[in-house]
Amino acid sequence: MLNLYRRLDTRLMGKARAPMLALVLLSLSLGCAKGNVCKDLASCGGNPMDKWAQVPRGEETPGTYCQEVVHAPPIESTLRGQLTPVARQRLPERTTLDWCSELVITGDQKEAIKNHNYWWEDLPYLNGFLEYLPNGTYLAGLTRKGFVDRWYSQTCLRKYGFVGNCQDFKAAFERANQGAGEYNTFECNENAQRGGCDCSFQIFEVNKLYGTYSVDGSTITHYSASPVEHASQVSMCVQGDKIKFTGKDNSFLWDRPGLRTMEMVRMNCNDGVMGPGELGVDCGLGCPNPCPAPAPAPAPAP
C-alpha cells in the first residue's frame, strides 16, 4: 500500500511539474537574446596586402563597426600577483572593491600621487591602421579614446596626509602623468553636496600589434607576436578601396576585447590632404613621415 501511495504521489508531482517546466523554458526562450550581438560582414575575400586605415566613427558604412560590451571589473589589489590555486584548493577570499580606486596621495609636493588605479572598460576604437606586408608580416595600431568620470571622497583624499583642494588634486594628477600621454586632460571640482572632488580625465590608449599572417580564401590567420603569442582569425572582404573584417567564429578582431567587425579604407600618404590613419597632412600614425612638431607658444610679454 505504501508503494502505491508513492507511485501516485510521483505521478501527481510529475503532472504538476510539467507546466512549471514548460513555463521556465518559455521564459528563458523569451528572455535570452537570439543570434549574435554583432552581425557578420561580407567575406568575399580579395588581396589584403596594403595599408589600411579605420574609417572615422560616424563616417563608416552603417553597421560595419560593432563592438560588444565586455564587462571586466578591476581586480582587487589583494588578489593581484597571487599563485593560481591547484586542483581542489580554495580560491583566495574575495574582498570588497576599493572605492578610492586604490588612491594613495600624500603631502609630497613633488610627487603626491603614489598609487592610483586608472581602471576603465569598453572604450571605442578610433584611428586604427593596419598594414599587410609582402614578406608575410603585419603591423597594426589600434587606438581607444574616451572620458572617465570619478568621485573621490574626503576620506580617500585625506587618509594619507594630502591637505590640498580639488585644484591641487588636479595638479597632482597632471604631474603624475607627465610625458606618458595615456591619461590626460584632467579636471577636478568640488562636490558641493557630499564633499570631495568630482574628477574626469581622458584615456588615450594605443595598441601596437605585429606578427605574421597567412591568407586562405577569405580567411586571414594572424600569428601575433605582441602582446600575446597565439593565432586569431578574421574573415575579410576587399571591395575597391575598402576592406571589411569580421572576427571568425564570433571571435574578437586581433584579440582586441569586444571588437567584432570593422571597415577600413586604403591609405594614401601622398595626396596632400589629411585622411584616415594620419595625424596631419600625409604624416603620422600609418604614414612613414612623422608630423612636424608644433610651433612653441610665444613667450608672454614682460
Image (cartoon, grey):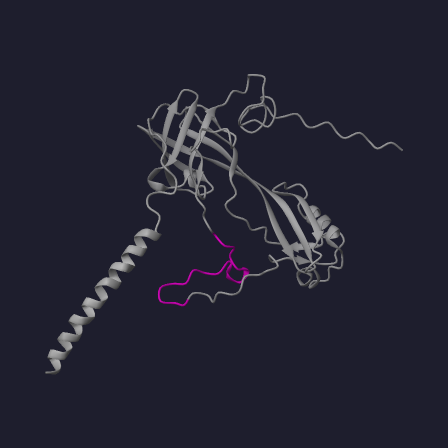
Q: What x and y, as percent, mark residue 294?
A: 70, 28
User: Where, by quadrant of the figure, is residue 180 drawn?
Assistant: top right
Residue in the picture at 18% in, 71% down: 12
**As drawn, 110 above or below 282:** below
**As drawn, 283 above or below 160:** above
Is 82 covered by the magenta stretch? yes
Position of the N terminus, as image quadrant, is bottom left
Give the magenta range: 72-90
Left or right? Give the position of 260 relative to 15: right
User: Where, by quadrant of the figure, is residue 205 drawn?
Assistant: top right
Q: Hey, which residue is sitting farthest top in the picture?
A: 271
Is 185 covered by the magenta stretch? no
Residue in the picture at 20% in, 71% down: 13
Q: What x and y, as percent, mark residue 284?
A: 58, 27
Q: What x and y, as percent, mark residue 168?
A: 75, 52
Left or right? Give the position of 223 relative to 157: left
- Total number of numbered labels? 0
Magenta: predominant secondary structure element?
Answer: loop
